[in-house]
Amino acid sequence: MRNLLPKALPILSCTLLNLTLQAQCGPGEAEVIIQVSTDGYGAEAYWELLPLGGTCGTGALFAGGNALVGCNGAGAQAQPTGGYANNVTVNEGPWCLPLGTAFDIFWADDWGDGGITFSVLVDGQLTAQFTGTDGAPAETFTFVVQPPAAYDVELVRLNTPLYAPEGTDLYVTGDVRNTGLQTITDLQLAYTVDGGSAVVATLPVNLAAGATLAFRHALPWATTGIGSHQVAVYPGQLNGNPDGNAYNDTLVMTTKVHPPTPNIIDQYLNGQPVLSVVADSDEDLLVPRDLDFHPDPDRNELWVINKDVPSTGGSTVTFFNAGAPDMSYMWKRDPNAWHFMSLPTALAMGDNGFFATCPGIFDANQNGGDPFTGPSLWSADTSIYADVIYGPLGSHFDMLHVTPNSQGMAHERWNRYWVVDGFNGDIVMNDFTVDHGPGNSWHGDAIIRRYADFTITKDPNDHIVSHTVFDKATGWLYVVDHGGQRVLRLDTQGGTVTGPGNYGPWESYAEYSMVSGYAWDVVVNTGLVQPAGIDVIGDRLLVSDHANGDIVIYDIATMPAVELGRVATGNAGLMGIRIGPDGRIWGVNATTHQLVRVEPAVATGIRDIGSAGFRAYPSPNEGALWLNGDVPVGTPLVVRDACGRLVLSSTWPSPGEAIDVQALPAGLYLVDVPSTGGSLRFVRR
């Protein structure tokens, strides 16, 4: 456990420039104060004030925090004593520094989990603010000694997805702060992708001096090009005026674009699909209730959540190279899972390196008190998640507390998740916004909105789940109503806030509201016995029936949905289901303690589009693959091995051109062409 120790005096080194500890500065100078705000582990931080471009340990104007961390202790996790106290704000300075001069703040974090905030005050006015980034143990921030400009905004953070399928409209989102003196009513924001042409839009706002605004750029990025892309965001005109401080303008992030999931669901309607058991109790599955894939399909990483018992809390099993001959697995349980993962019903992967779980218990404290219960946020990094060294609050990164007996959850974007409140029968949007770091406890920045125009009825025995899925292409949330033997949906993009939340709360949040006036539909109300799991792709909706193991396929192009057919798995006890990156249906069975994969009826598990005049040849193949068919040149395609793993990304070649498959080992391969809904087979010799 990390030590929580009192503050030690910071080390001072004022050796360069005219650094005077007095309030009155000379001509051409300004008084600078740097406020240092710590998190729950203040001893982890060390920082230096440096000339622009300076190196830590050489010519520092000031050194503060824990000298035992020093310039080279970032991420060492040595847990030294001393330094700043926990959860305090310390004023360092004042110093008289030359106006118009840029300086650097270098900081190192022993643990590498961020949390320290530096606020720069020039002549008593806030001009810049920087917060250490989780996962970046050492950082350098730059500021300019100048009073606030009349018009100046700072890009605080970006929360655009880190992973996205090709061909989707990706909205650039984040937070921006008004660090100028004037209220901004017209905020122009621009972004570029890989240094290309700027995409500019003006947002009508009412952003007072010092205020922060969550933004979404009006013009989405139509993701093209499989691979990593640099997205840079910066301000343009502010009320028709240029931004007055270039040093706090631009933020850059990387988004990995991956091939879209092939939609082969209709292939399950032709013949009897084949179910295979991928894992069971031998791989530590114990009443598994839900599953999800890591959003980076190249990892082929599948997470399953176990119900377990209240005294220990739930656990997870992570499968690496899921379903492949070399599959491995890792079982983990956080030391405080009894509270943060009590009888979990669902797991949902985020698009930012995190995942969330929701508890099926009424009172997560298990002491007969208030239902201090709701979803928890976790790192998807297995070196962080469920690591005992994070202390009395475990490794969780956030938790909210107004949804007891939660039944299902779905990810929307970044740290925003939708949860089925099984106790009240409502749907609740839980936005953790900025996580509080591993093992901390502040939840005051959360935004929670409750939707209560219809009722979801949970299993009275608190066993079978009522899952939900968010359709990111349309904004509709599809919800299983287990007790009503039906499926509903609500339009998350509609509705208005009508007042404070009507249940709880037991702690303070930035917002907790009721929403009304949104559209909702009954999607399915016949033919289901014990509906549990759910997933969606395109205009196809899948629902698992716990009673008989059926997976029912619906056409949701019109409402009510039309049942197209059933995948009769014969696997009674089926709960959570998920369409994997390979297009196949995966599920967990809480009765047999199994992880299963369902293949279409065709022997290879794929419908061959060769019958329509398509062909991949020669087969067997020795390195050059030729494709025939009526597909536009440049159409994205991917090659997968017999286990569904992505081995090659390419595009449909021009006539007379071949695809180089020389590097592929011998075996059976499938060329998936998502836009056609089909695939081609070939054998590499």
Image (cartoon, grey):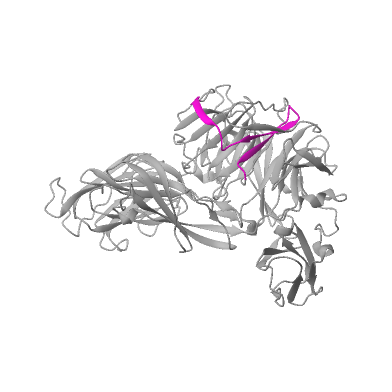
For the C terminus, the image quarter is: bottom right
Based on the picture, tell me whether residue 559 belongs to the magenta stretch. Answer: no
Please, is residue 226 above or below residue 452 in the view?
below
- What is the span of residues highlighted in magenta in the rendered image? 474-500
- Main secondary structure along the magenta-highlighted residues: strand
Residue 284 in the image: state x and y as whole percent.
71, 45
Kindly indicate the quadrant of the structure image that contains residue 99. Answer: bottom left
631 or 320, nearer to the observer = 631
Please, is residue 660 above or below residue 77 in the view?
below
Residue 498 in the image: state x and y as whole percent.
50, 26
In the image, 6: left or right of 336?
left
Residue 301 in the image: state x and y as whole percent.
65, 54
| Residue ID at (57%, 24%) | 367
In the image, 550: left or right of 421?
right
- Residue 130 visible in the displayed image: no
Please, is residue 612 above or below residue 658 in the view?
above
- Residue 53 visible in the displayed image: yes
Residue 556 in the image: state x and y as whole percent.
72, 41
492 or 551, nearer to the observer = 492
Please, is residue 441 above or below residue 514 in the view?
below
In the image, 147: left or right of 115?
left
437 or 528, nearer to the observer = 528
Count the marks: how many? 0
In the image, 194: left or right of 451?
left
